Amino acid sequence: MAEKKLCVALLAGGKSGEREVSLKGAEEVGRALDSQQYSVRSYDPATDMARLAAEAGEIDVAFVLLHGKYGEDGTVQGFLDLLGIPYQGAGVLGSAVAMDKDIAKILYRNAGLRVPDWVMAIPDDATRPDRILEILELPLVIKPVRQGSSLGMSIAHTPDELAKGVGLAFSHDTEVMVEQYVAGREITGGVLGNDNLTALPLVEIIPGDSYTFFDYEAKYKPGATKEICPADLDTNLASRAQQAAIKAHKALKLRGYSRTDMIVCGDDIFILETNTIPGMTPTSLLPQAAEAYGFSFSSLLDRLIALAMEK
Ligand SMILES: Nc1ncnc2c1ncn2[C@@H]1O[C@H](COP(=O)(O)OP(=O)(O)O)[C@@H](O)[C@H]1O
Ligand SMILES: [Mg+2]
């Protein structure tokens, strides 16, 4: 007799700037989830939270494919905790600290990881950038503290660009940080597991010549960025970067999986941020790394669901 299928609630859409990215990922995840094992129900938190709560008793596990605010930041995770529904990836605390790039950097540094120097901006810096320039040197990277997909981010080479960048970032978030620009090779390191963590092969990210960094378009326009997996790095450096990804995952108290963005500059590895719900199309960075490790996209989803349901 056939076993009962697991009822998976696929949460996608939501209200953040990454809504479209989320919906696109959910299409792919919905397609790849093995229909012999799972029955899938879709919920969009923008409209379906009441229905999710009403149907909670019929749901075995949730797959949260939301990015950014109200999805990747712990809010949805808290809602699912209250409903007693397990879900893949980080819990409330880990999601919230990873979403806050300022808090995350404090935790990385505390764990002995290297991060680019940074200061928190104030709205005044958008007209008087000299306050920041007394602390950090150009070029600088300006980021909304709680955003993803490079939204609202810019790189400043002049005081004027710094002022404009601060203004732009404040239109995306009430908190903005300014970080030292690090020139080097950009890599990302996936981690998989609950108690026993596996560092996946690294991916090197090389945005095309028309991009000054891995911005929104470079991230999502097909062919805009070259991604090399496994990254062609010296073995010793690669293993240090993989260990750094694991350390970052632990420092933020994450669970299930994560993907940490880093820049390698000479022998130094700088941590930029950790994604708790990394992009999830078959060609996204973490699925690529999992594939190089031996997990097909479908089996990666199976693994994430199994990890979600592990006590
Ligand atoms: N300090 C930095 N030095 C150089 N490039 C950076 C720096 N911070 C961010 N970047 C570039 O901006 C991209 C997005 O920054 P990141 O911190 O990963 O935020 P997001 O959450 O938007 O992905 C990175 O992938 C990298 O290309
Ligand atoms: Mg990033």
Image: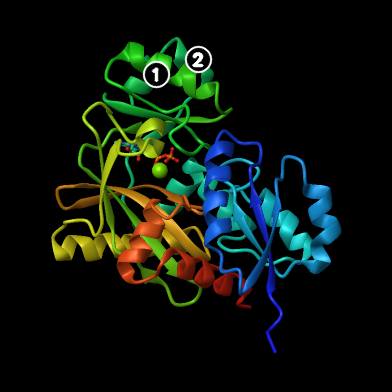
Q: Position of residue 169 (x, y in %)?
A: 48, 24
The residue that mark 2 highlights is 124
Q: Residue at x 82, y 52 (%)?
A: 51
Q: Which of 89 and 178 is in front in this view?
A: 89
Where on the picture, by quarter, is residue 295?
A: bottom left
**Would you say 58 lies left or right of 138 here?**
right
The residue that mark 1 highlights is 131
C-alpha gap between disc 1 and disc 2 = 9 Å
Relative to 35, residue 66 above or below: above
- Secondary structure of the residue carrying tag 1 is helix
Q: Which residue is drawn at 77% across and 46% down?
A: 48
Residue 110 in sight in this render: no
Q: How busy is the neighbourhood of tag 1: few (under 14 within 10 Å), some, or many (20 plus)?
A: few
| Closer to viewer: mark 1 or mark 2 | 2
Q: Do the residues labelled 1 and 2 touch (CB within 8 Å)?
A: yes
Relative to 105, residue 242 above or below: below
